[in-house]
Structures are given as structure tokens and as C-alpha cells.
Image (tube, coloured by chain):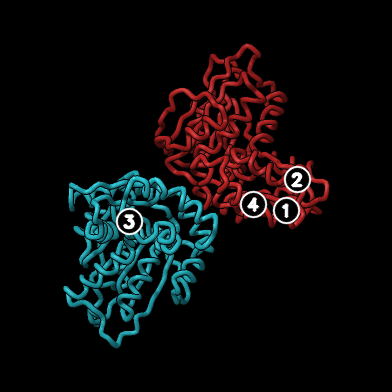
Chain colours: A red, B cyan
């Protein structure tokens, strides 16, 4: 695959942060980035034509991630953020060895924050069925500290509840109770939101868990890692930069885009529709 | 595509009914077939590696349906049942013009039953977001009787609730009320279950709708159409036949297979794992 070299004539610092997800959920990472880095330009690409990546083979997820990353490099992005748990779990090593700009996923920032947060050494992880089955947070947490205990729970109703926009609803509160009661009873003191959709349920989940359980938002921790990276590499946009947000999708947006925009308070102009580039593989 | 000719040496009547769906949901059609035609052998093929078909392009759904149908013909099936709303809506004409055995989908049997059932001329249709957006039941009902009124409602939480096995749960009852109240208030007297998963919620939905609304189960109506077809073509298995059920999937089964087996009371032996055949296209 030929990955585009950065365009000349634009200062590296003024180039956008490229963010991608299999769909719309990764906008929670964009929202966290805008709060932390309000003057950074961001180009978001959601591969809605092929959503979800969860459940697809590692080879397919790698190929899709490379294709989407190539599209972001063609936008002259200075760094890439993989705002998708499945792609972070399955495609990060391949992306890191292939693309010419620094790259950040969501798994390690979330795992590190959970390891730092737990006091009793028992961490809960929630995510989609595919994420929980493949266990990337569990592996990352155990790699950081093998003595920690991890209890994982798939919450397959959270994504459809969020996509319906039922963020504050008695139904959602009951589903949260049904899924999270076993984790609370098991004694976790920290819960990782292991799906980029879940920060949209953050308030409802925090209300259920109460003050004694720390909620680790992997979108927020991913954004903090990106800020550190840009500072270390001297890639921060100038303070006078406008911080424009561009959003492109590989298939027409559905109602969930409106839900996410409103809940996250994101100003998104016209959403661009992009065809996936299928480069020759090498 | 070369479609296999029926194998010699087996009476046409003793060959299995081939049933396919993008996933496990089509087992509701198998269950209805077993009740109506207990001595018919059935070969079920669920394309779980590529589920869901809803949301994919018509060309892709046609190609997938042809590939899966070719696999069923290789099992010597005497007739094909498309137990998938998306494939029934998008691939039936192509299948009918290509394959050498009679074929039945789920849309027309459901639409015909709804048209026969309504007394006030106002029919409700519920389904996945993809089915409701593409509107196949609406088109079929209006083709049968342009004077009828159709109110459609996407119920995207039903499939994940069913796949969780929450068939009898207060949460599910509340979701049913949330989705179906607008249809009841609009005055429908008939509701079509326009998704092959939904018969698993039939009792809970009927409890909410009460006696004044007729529930049309497209799985059941599809099975009745298959019985008529086999009788008309003189393809019914002999009364002494064993009525064996074979189930094959294109990817390993998940927990939903257990939910469906138990809820439908189906006796399924070892589930076969099959790779999709990608024949040369012509």
C-alpha cells in the first residue's frame, strides 16, 4: 500500500488530527479532544459503510483500518487516533509498522488509567460482545500489573439504546442495573467504559455506580494521551489556530449522528460522503 | 454461477427443504415448518459470518443469497425458503430467475396474511431499521390493495433484547410499550412481525396489543405458503419420513443459538460449520 507523504507548504503543527472509527461512536473521542485541545483541527472519518468491525476477522479489520488510515493521510493528518476498540485491539501493531505518523488507540490509555485508579485491585471492564470476547482490556491491564483482578461484562444493549437516543430513560437505567449489578456485587472499585459509544451513557452509569466506583472513560484518556504525544513531538497547533472539525463518513449518516452531535454538543458542518479507497496491497 | 443439479437416486419428495437466513433468527421459520410439516427433512443454513444483511447493498445481498442458495442446492434441497427479510426483499427476483427449484420468501406471505386480517384497513409493520427504511412490506401490502393504510415502525432494540434471551422481562415489556404505543394510537388493527427474530417476542407483544389487534407472524405464514407449494407440486415427504433437522452456520454459533433452541423447543444435533462457497460469477 502506498501511503501518502505529508503535503508540503503546511506547517506540521497546523495539520489536522485524524480520528477514525467503524462508525459514529468515535465522536466521543473527538468531543474529548475538543475539550482538551480546542484549537486543534480534527478530521473524523467514520467507516459507516462497514460498521461494525467487531466480529470481523483480524485480517479484515487490519485491511479496513489501513484503508481508512490511508484516506486520513491523504487529508494530511499529522497523527492518527484509532477511536474504535476493535481496530485498536486488532490493527494497531500493523498500523504502527506501516504509517509514517504517530498513532494512538483507545485500549492502552483506558487500561493505564484503570490501573492507576483502582485501590482494591479489582477492575471491571464493559464493552460490546466482540470486545469482551476478545479481551483486549483484560490483556492490557494484566500486562501492566499481573496481580490485578479483572471482571468483564458484555453489554450488547448499550449501543442500540445509545443509537436510539435513549440516554436518559427509565428503560436504560434498568438495563444498566441489570448489566452492572454483577460487577458491583463482585466488588470492582473501577469500571472501564470499553466502547467508544459508552461515554454517552456516562452520567446514567455513574448515577448507578455511585461515588465509590471510579468510572474510566477511555475516550477521555485517549484524548489525554494524544495531547501528551503532540506536546512531546512538538506538534501542537498554534494558540491562534481555529480548531475546525471536519466529519466524513463512508455511507450516509443515520439518526445516530444527530443523537451524538446533540449529546456531545459538537458543531459539525456538512458531513462529507467518501468512498473507501481500495489501494493495491503489497 | 453453476448451480448443482439435483442428485439422482433420491426421490424428489424425500429431499430436504432448504432454509436460509443471514443468522439464527430464521430458526423461527424452521420452528413453524416443523409444526406444520413435522415429517419434512429440513436443512438450515445461517450465514452468521456475514450477519446482518440489513444495511448492505442490494448487489451484495443478491450475491450472498446466491452463494448460500448454491450451498443448499448442493445439499439436494427440493425447495428453498428465504427466512430473511432483507434477502426476501432484495434477492428474490434474482433467485427465482436463477435457481432450478421453487422458492418462498417471508415478505409476501406476511403481507397477504395482513391484508386478509385487517378489518379497518390500517396495518402496522414492525422490523429492523434496515427493513423499515427499505419498506418491502409496505410495497407488498399496497400492491395487494392500494386503499390500505400502512404505519411502519423500526424497533431496533428488539433483536438485541431477543439475542440476550430477555424474552420475558420487565425491560422488554417497557421497550415493547415504547415502540408500539404510537402504532396503537394511530389505530392499526393488525401488526406484522416483519423480522424473523420477532416471533420469539410474540407472546410479550400480543400481551401488550391485547385482543383487538391481530398479530401477523410472517414465519408462520411463510411456513403455510411452503406447505401449499409442496402440496401443489406433489413434493410432500411421505408420511413415514423422519423429518430430520440439520443446522449449518458459516461462523461459530454464539449464545443466541441456545436462546432460540430453547425458546422454540427445537432439537438440533451437532451444528455444522461451513465455509461459504464463492463460485465464479457469470
Lower sequence index among marks 2 and 4: 4
Q: Residue at x 50, y 56 (%)?
A: B173
Labelled pair 4, 1 in contact (Cβ < 8 Å): no
Labelled pair 1, 2 in contact (Cβ < 8 Å): yes
Q: Chain of mark 2?
A: A
- Classify 10 Å Cα crowding around label 3: few (below 14), some (14-19), many (20 and above): many
Residue A192, image x, y percentages = 69, 45
Q: Secondary structure at mark 3?
A: strand
B6 up-or-down from A72: above or below: below
Q: Chain of mark 1?
A: A
* Relative to B164, B98 lies left or right: left
Labelled pair 2, 4 in contact (Cβ < 8 Å): no
Marks 1 & 2 on one chain: yes
Q: CA distance from mark 1 to mark 2?
A: 9 Å
B247 up-or-down from A158: above or below: below
Labelled pair 3, 4 in contact (Cβ < 8 Å): no
Residue, disc 4: A177
Q: Is residue B47 visible?
A: no
Q: Chain of mark 4?
A: A
Residue, disc 3: B192
Lower sequence index among marks 4 and 1: 4
Q: Secondary structure at mark 4?
A: helix
Mark number for residue A184? 1
Residue, disc 2: A213
Q: CA distance from mark 2 to mark 3?
A: 45 Å
Q: Residue at x 34, y 84 (%)?
A: B242
Amino acid at each position: 500500500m502506498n501511503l501518502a507523504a505529508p503535503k508540503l507548504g503546511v506547517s506540521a503543527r497546523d495539520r489536522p488530527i485524524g480520528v477514525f472509527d467503524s462508525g459514529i461512536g468515535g465522536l466521543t473521542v473527538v468531543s474529548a479532544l475538543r475539550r482538551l485541545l480546542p484549537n486543534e483541527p480534527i478530521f473524523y472519518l467514520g467507516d459507516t459503510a462497514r460498521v461494525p468491525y467487531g466480529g470481523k476477522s483480524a485480517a479484515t479489520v487490519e485491511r479496513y483500518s489501513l484503508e481508512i488510515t490511508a484516506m486520513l493521510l491523504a487529508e494530511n493528518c499529522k497523527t492518527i487516533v484509532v477511536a474504535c476498540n476493535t481496530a485498536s485491539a486488532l490493527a494497531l501493531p500493523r498500523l504502527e509498522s506501516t504509517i509514517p505518523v504517530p498513532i494512538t488507540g483507545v485500549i492502552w490509555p483506558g487500561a493505564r488509567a484503570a490501573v492507576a485508579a483502582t485501590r482494591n485491585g479489582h477492575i471491571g471492564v464493559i464493552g460490546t460482545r466482540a470486545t469482551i470476547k476478545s479481551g483486549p482490556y483484560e490483556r492490557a491491564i494484566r500486562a501492566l500489573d499481573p496481580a490485578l483482578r479483572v471482571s468483564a461484562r458484555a453489554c450488547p444493549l448499550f449501543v442500540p439504546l445509545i443509537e436510539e437516543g435513549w440516554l436518559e430513560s427509565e428503560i436504560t437505567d434498568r438495563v444498566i442495573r441489570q448489566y452492572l449489578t454483577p460487577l458491583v456485587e463482585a466488588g470492582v472499585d473501577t469500571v472501564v467504559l470499553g466502547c467508544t459509544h459508552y461515554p454517552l451513557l456516562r452520567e446514567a452509569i455513574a448515577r448507578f455506580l455511585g461515588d465509590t466506583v471510579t468510572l474510566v472513560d477511555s475516550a477521555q484518556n485517549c484524548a489525554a494521551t494524544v495531547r501528551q504525544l503532540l506536546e512531546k513531538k512538538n506538534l501542537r497547533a498554534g494558540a491562534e489556530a481555529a480548531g475546525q472539525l471536519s466529519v466524513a463518513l463512508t455511507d450516509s449518516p443515520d439518526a445516530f449522528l444527530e443523537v451524538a452531535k446533540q449529546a456531545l454538543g459538537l458543531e459539525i458542518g456538512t458531513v462529507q460522503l467518501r468512498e473507501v479507497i481500495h489501494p493495491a496491497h503489497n
